[in-house]
Amino acid sequence: EVQLLESGGGLVQPGGSLRLSCAASGFTFNNYAMSWVRQAPGKGLECVSGISGSGRNTYYADSLKGRFTISRDNSKNTLYLQMKSLRAEDTAVYYCARYLGATTVVDYWGQGTLVTVSS
Amino acid sequence: EIVMTQSPATLSVSPGERVTLSCGASQSVSSNLAWYQQTPGQAPRLLIYDASTRATGVPARFGGSGSGTEFTLTISSLQSEDFAVYYCQQYSSWPSFGPGTKVDIK
């Protein structure tokens, strides 16, 4: 059974940093591209970042302007999202997501971790 | 950036009714269109990809159609567990989602 378990969310002050982790199990991790998708409270879905199975290729939403870094450790079956210079508008549930094949369709989602940026 | 739209924003339906949800793209996305279902407090669930292919385990009452800029999700007979928010997503370029359609009980 595919499982994606996020951790690392919490309350952080504006301008602060946070690192999210996603522990994956139930599939061959390095065979799949992965992603982080966020959802602000009561709002819709936004793809934040993606990474290829090998980790060599990374992709980001233009709106992030270099503040976030996605990475993975295939030896630990873990995906990461390093976030810095956080703003109130980054407040959201962050979902770890697995891509379907060579597409950016999400076929499996974690349960999400809440990041709250507030003073 | 491809902008996705969905209509209506909210749909009030009785169980057993047929439901049709619409999704539009600001430019052609070919058939690179997916649909997701999200119930309160839960992560989204993939229903449809490639505009009309049901994901594994998705009941046959869910159907997708369309190509280019106009797409439709049809639920042939709404069940109680189908009351949820439905999102479309294009993956022709950097993935973007529509604002969602909430299907609630009439």
Image (cartoon, coloured by chain):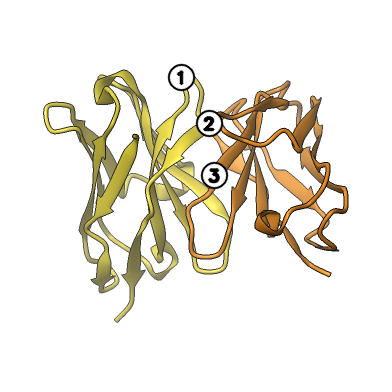
| Residue drawn at (36%, 66%) of the image | A87
- Circle 1: is it few (<14), some (14-19), or many (20+) Cα within 10 Å? few
Disc 1 or disc 3, which is closer to the eye? Answer: 3
Determine whether the residue tagged by mark 3 lies in a helix, strand or loop. Answer: strand
Q: What is the display colour for chain B?
A: orange
Q: Nearer the viewer, residue A9 or B11?
A: B11
Q: Which residue is mark 2?
A: A105
* Residue A110 appears anywhere in the view: yes
Count of numbered labels shown in the rendering = 3
Are labels 1 and 3 assigned to the same chain? Answer: no
Determine which quarter of the picture holds residue B96.
Answer: top right
Q: Quadrant of the C terminus of chain A?
A: bottom left
Q: What is the display colour for chain A?
A: yellow
* Callout 3–callout 2 Cβ contact below 8 Å: no
Q: Is residue A1 above or below residue A81?
A: above
Three-letter amino acid code at disc 1?
Gly
Q: Which residue is mark 3?
A: B45
Three-letter amino acid code at disc 2?
Val
Q: Residue furthest left?
A: A75
Q: Is residue B37 left or right of residue B74?
A: left
Determine whether the residue tagged by mark 1 lies in a helix, strand or loop. Answer: loop
* Callout 1–callout 2 Cβ contact below 8 Å: yes
Q: Nearer the viewer, residue B30 or B47?
A: B47
Q: Which residue is mark 1?
A: A101
Q: Is residue B23 left or right of residue A41?
A: right
| Residue drawn at (58%, 27%) of the image | B93
Disc 3 or disc 2, which is closer to the eye? Answer: 3
